[in-house]
Amino acid sequence: MARLYTDDLSIGYGERLIVKNLSVEIPDKKITIIIGSNGCGKSTLLKAITRIISHQSGRVILDGKNITKENTKILAKKMAILPQTPESASGLTVGELVSYGRFPYQKGFGRLTKKDYEVIDWALEVTGTKDFKFRPVDALSGGQRQRVWIAMALAQETEIIFLDEPTTYLDMAHQLEVLELLQKLNIEQERTIVMVLHDLNQAARFADYIIALKNGEIVKVGNCEDVMNPDVLKKVFHIDAEIGRDPRTNKPICITYNLVNGE
Ligand SMILES: Nc1ncnc2c1ncn2[C@@H]1O[C@H](COP(=O)(O)OP(=O)(O)OP(=O)(O)O)[C@@H](O)[C@H]1O
Ligand SMILES: [Mg+2]
């Protein structure tokens, strides 16, 4: 059994149920990518697993314990999340924002230790944001700011990292840089990575495990070979996809697609 799993989890807003009776394992030390169309419940699921929002029924179990019963700082040392639209950080410098990632480790008045400063500098370094350290977050471009938020999540030094569409706003090179960084953290430091991506080819390239959602329910879970096929993509996205092979990575890729209408 994985460290982290959901058991018959249902999540909603008011009367409206978004995620329905979902039971899924998040494999340890792997990269899991969640795919699905807009509004299908990906962010809702991530928020409930990380306890940003509460769920309606079922359980999220981490290390044998229901997360609703877990201490906040302990949880924050185990799981970090980069939300899809992080709260604005107006008035903060980049260094200050990234230092917020160290909150689970702070005691008393929250003074930063030498170790905290080292981790902050490491997070700035690996996300290529070191040069912005003393600049206001507000004064960065969308892509620069996105990488700073990623740095903050990394500074939390958790074994499990959730990222909701981390490549939004990033140019093609920076998208690949971020995904390769996450892959490196996964391989070299055995961190469990869970992210939402809309780019199916990137999902196939980087995922060990893909969860395909539709209307808050699982259509398919498996590796890229299991999920990147015309049948699954038709069910999940209503597209008629032509799947080929990436000549460099040998992973499946969607070469072209059309919309399927009237089904
Ligand atoms: N705070 C909220 N209150 C009420 N409804 C919400 C709230 N947040 C999301 N929803 C609704 O829940 C559904 C799922 O939203 P969610 O953000 O989980 O989708 P998503 O799969 O992440 O989509 P996207 O790809 O667009 O990010 C949507 O219909 C959305 O309108
Ligand atoms: Mg979302």
Image (cartoon, rainbow, N blue to C red):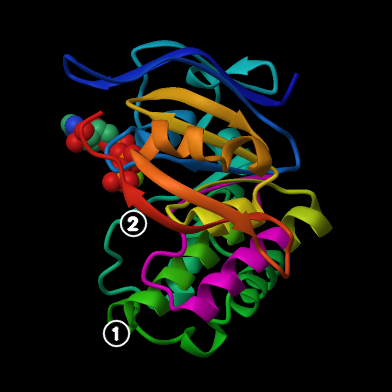
Cα gap from disc 1 to disc 2, whole angstroms: 16 Å
Which residue has dot 1 on it?
139
The answer to which of marks 1 and 2 sits earlier in the sequence is 2
Give the percent coordinates (x, y) of residue 263.
25, 28
Magenta stretch encompasses residue 181: yes
Dots 1, 2 in contact, CB < 8 A: no
Which residue has dot 2 on it?
86
Give the percent coordinates (x, y) of residue 213.
43, 31
Circle 1 SS class: helix
Q: Would you say the beta carbon of the disc 2 residue lies within 8 angstroms of ligand 2?
A: no
Identified at 40% across, 31% down, the residue is 235
Quarter of the image for the N terminus: give it: top right
Give the percent coordinates (x, y) of residue 82.
45, 53
* Amino acid at pointer 1: Ala
What is the crowding at mark 1: few (fewer than 14 residues within 10 Å), some, or many (at least 20)? some
Circle 2 SS class: loop
Magenta stretch encompasses residue 173: yes
Give the percent coordinates (x, y) of residue 59.
50, 13
Identified at 72% across, 43% down, the residue is 30
Specify the segment rendered in magenta. Answer: 157-183
